Amino acid sequence: MTSPDDSAHRPLRSFGRIKSRAIKPRQAALFDTLLPTIALPDPKAGPIDPKALMPDATAVWLEIGFGGGEHLAEQAARHPDTLMIGCEPFLNGVGSALRHIDERGLTNVRLHADDARDVMAALPDASLDCVMILFPDPWHKARHNKRRLVQDETAAEIARLLKPGGRLRFVTDWKDYADWALERFERTPGLVWRAETADDWRTAPADHVVTRYEEKKLGDTAPIFLDFVREA
């Protein structure tokens, strides 16, 4: 049972609902069959060693909030030698990702159907080659900004986790969130923004995967792509 003191020190939820419509029968079945075989160890039970999850992996990527899983699955297919860790608390999204993983026969994906910050805290220093945050919940009302995933603490944690030369990609379709994230990432020691011209944040990188969410154009701007590198 969680004590009042634990609740007081737990970070605010950076995500909204964890379920909407009923999960489709096929996806529900995958929760019972596939998910137990690819789920991350409980991050609250102790440290997570990526090498133990996929000993022959040549790189480790983390996607925070993978939505419906299209991007995670496509990147996993493109990089079969890379361990792809995906975190998503929205159960319908987890179900969708399980379907993609199952249909494509992917063996290099590990999922955490909950808050990514618990996983981040359990990973060792300099253990990730890439961190991806694509279209996180904008919490665009000023009084809700404190619930945004990107805070100074999160940025510092990402810098801790990235290997020298590792990459961070943040994408949003809300102008205010782009400004908010850029401010916090730029003041985080170790993270260097790679942009040189406006096209660097206006044009999708060559390896970007367009998702159904992006196609809905729910924000107030075209997608803004912020790419950072962890300096040595």
Image: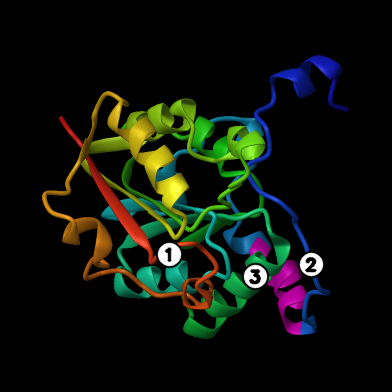
Is residue 149 shown in magenta?
Answer: no
For disc 3, the neighbor class at 10 Å (few under 14, some 14 to 19, many from 20) is some
First of labels 3, 1 by sequence position: 3
The answer to whether the residue labelled 3 contacts the one labelled 1, judged by CB atoms less than 8 Å apart, is no
Residue 65 location (% of width, % of height): 54, 55
Distance of mark 1 from mark 2, alpha carbons?
Answer: 28 Å
Residue 182 location (% of width, % of height): 34, 39
First of labels 1, 2 by sequence position: 2
Quarter the C terminus occupies: top left
Magenta-drawn segment: 26-35
For disc 1, the neighbor class at 10 Å (few under 14, some 14 to 19, many from 20) is many
Q: How is the image coloured?
A: rainbow
The answer to whether the residue labelled 2 contacts the one labelled 3, judged by CB atoms less than 8 Å apart, is no
Which residue position is annotated with label 2? 20
Which residue position is annotated with label 1? 108
Give above or below for 26 relative to 159.
Answer: below
* Amino acid on which disc 2 is placed: Ser
Please say whether residue 124 is visible from this viewpoint.
Answer: no
> Residue 33's image quarter?
bottom right
- Please tell me which residue is depicted at 85% across the width and 20% down the height of the picture: 3
Q: Residue pushed farthest top?
A: 5
Distance of mark 2 from mark 3, alpha carbons?
Answer: 21 Å
Which label number is shown at residue 18? none
Q: Nearer the viewer, mark 2 or mark 3?
A: 2
Distance of mark 3 from mark 1, alpha carbons?
Answer: 13 Å
Which residue position is annotated with label 3? 34
Residue 184 location (% of width, % of height): 38, 31
Q: Nearer the viewer, mark 1 or mark 2?
A: 2
* Amino acid on which disc 1 is placed: Asn
Query: Is 164 on the left-hand or right-hand side of 93?
Result: left
Secondary element type, mark 3: loop
